[in-house]
Amino acid sequence: MSDNTGETRAEGSASAEKELMAGTDGEHVTLKLREKVAYGLGDFASSMFWKLFSMFLLFFYTDVFGISAAAVGTMFLVTRVWDAFNDPIMGLICDRTSTRWGKFRPYLLYVAFPFAIIGILTFSTPDFGMTGKLIYAYVTYTLMMMVYTAVNVPYASLMGVMTANTVERTSLASYRFLGAFSGGLFVTATAAWLIDYFGDGVDSAIGYQITVGIYAFLAAGLFILTFLGTRERLRPAIKTNKLKDDLRDIAKNAPWFIMLGAAISVLIFNSLREGAMLYYFRYFIGSQEVMFFGEVSWNALVSAYMSIWLAANIVGVLLAKPVSLWLGKKISFLTAMLLSAMLSFALFFLQPQQIELIFLLNVLIGITAGLVLPLIWSMYADIADFSEFRTGRRATGLIFSSSSMSQKFGWTIGGALSGWFLAAFGYQAGVDQTDTALLGIRLMISVLAGLGALLAVVFIWFYKLDEKKMVSITEELVVRRKNDGKGPQHMIS
């Protein structure tokens, strides 16, 4: 086996050398299906934990570990603000990394197992006092977010150097999010059952720890498969950018600021909605009579709701490419988020007995919300090209790390607001909720989430990099790379 692997690597290296000598610029590189699938596996791994964080972690801290909702909200704010600033730092580190495997791929290999170990510790429940529990949560969650950054920023940036073909980038982003939502769907479909099984229906703490352990080592293996199955093809043949130049360039990049605001708003929408789901079904919906199924328990309903939400997101991801080719990325983004907001507002008026309508809105919101996510990453790749077009310098890692940073900021704000809203409306873990507490839970999943989607609409309205402008920019960059050395790119193995 090792001999065959060595031959494959040698053939790949020789192929890369031939492409380098041929002066391939990456614009016309068409990625093979197996490489797109390998790239998608990386977000399958990341998104297993993203869904654990966004859908289960707040509930785990309040109802399993025993930390107050207000304390958890403050912890999310403090730790995630620090973590958000880690993303550009990691992007700068990646841009200055140089190995035979490229700038970004090595981190998928190096960080895989630290990611798994710290993930298990994050969902462990040592028998400390309240202060000790809070300190433990701060430490483990901070470490978790740091290793998440250390693998996710390079992974996101990798898309920008696999091909320069803007259509292929949108396709690659779709595969990425197919992997992402598949990973999330795997968690929502199995987590509740595994937690109950390993906890023997009694000890949720043990159930969480073993369940997350399974996800953690699966994620580590998938990161390694992404490392093995992808290649970096584009590298600026210029001197390493100075930090002050990178920061000055991005400070003058208006589309970057617009996408940063839009992406943060999308994540506020998702964070509020997903963070409220467990509370919404346990305390507001309860067990319900469902057409064709009879009486269904609240935990079975929420498991189905989460899974259908992610399945609908996958439909949206599949629609992203054809819809964006028809309407353009900006109009597709704007329309999808406007629909998400309106449908979310409608959810507030539904009562528990209208369970079929609640699930129908879940499907529609899921499709519209899923459609924008590949567009965000594809548009960030366009923004990296726009930056190179304006400055002659390319800072792929820094540009793409900002997309991860926007996720963290949106998640930070949404997560902190979730904890604070629960506390402000009088939430108490494990007991029947007051009418005021139920109102807060309902607002989180509907009206407040919808306001986040509307804010994304406002931001994207001002985005100027439409398809016509990007064609012009891409053509100009190809000429520069071939003829005058302003940001030329070469093939690397």
Image: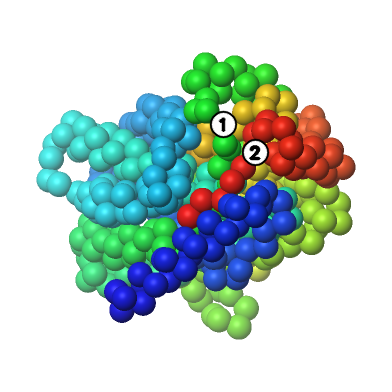
Residue 416 versus residue 138: which sits nearer the camera? 138
The tag earlier along the polypeptide, 2 or 1, is: 1
User: Please, what secondary structure does the residue beneath circle 1 have?
Assistant: loop
Left or right of residue 232: residue 370: right
Asked where in the image residue 203 lies, by quadrant, the reply is bottom left
User: Please, what secondary structure does the residue beneath circle 2 have?
Assistant: loop
Name of the residue lying farthest toward the front: 21
- Colouring method of the image: rainbow
Which residue bears the numbered disc 1?
A: 238
Q: What type is the residue that disc 1 sits on?
A: Ile
Disc count in the image? 2
Badge number at residue 363: none
For image coordinates 53% across by 56% down, the residue present is: 17
Visible residue check, residue 456: no
* Residue 330 position within the rendered picture, expressed as x and y whole percent measured from the top left: 79, 43
Q: Categorize mark 1 by other alpha carbons within 10 Å: few (<14), some (14-19), many (20+).
A: some
Q: Mark 2 to mark 1: distance in Å? A: 8 Å
* Residue 358 position within the rendered picture, expressed as x and y whole percent measured from the top left: 64, 61
Residue 209 versus residue 118 in the image, above or below: below
For image coordinates 57% across by 36% down, the residue present is: 237
Left or right of residue 461: residue 113: left
* Residue 234 position within the rendered picture, expressed as x and y whole percent measured from the top left: 58, 47
Tell me whether circle 2 and circle 1 mark residues in contact (CB < 8 Å).
Answer: yes
Q: What type is the residue that disc 2 sits on?
A: Pro
Residue 153 versus residue 390 in the image, above or below: below
Which residue bears the numbered disc 2?
A: 488
Visible residue check, residue 125: yes
For image coordinates 13% across by 40% down, the residue present is: 128
For image coordinates 41% across by 66% down, the residue present is: 9
Q: Categorize mark 2 by other alpha carbons within 10 Å: few (<14), some (14-19), many (20+).
A: many
* Residue 306 position within the rendered picture, expressed as x and y whole percent measured from the top left: 52, 62
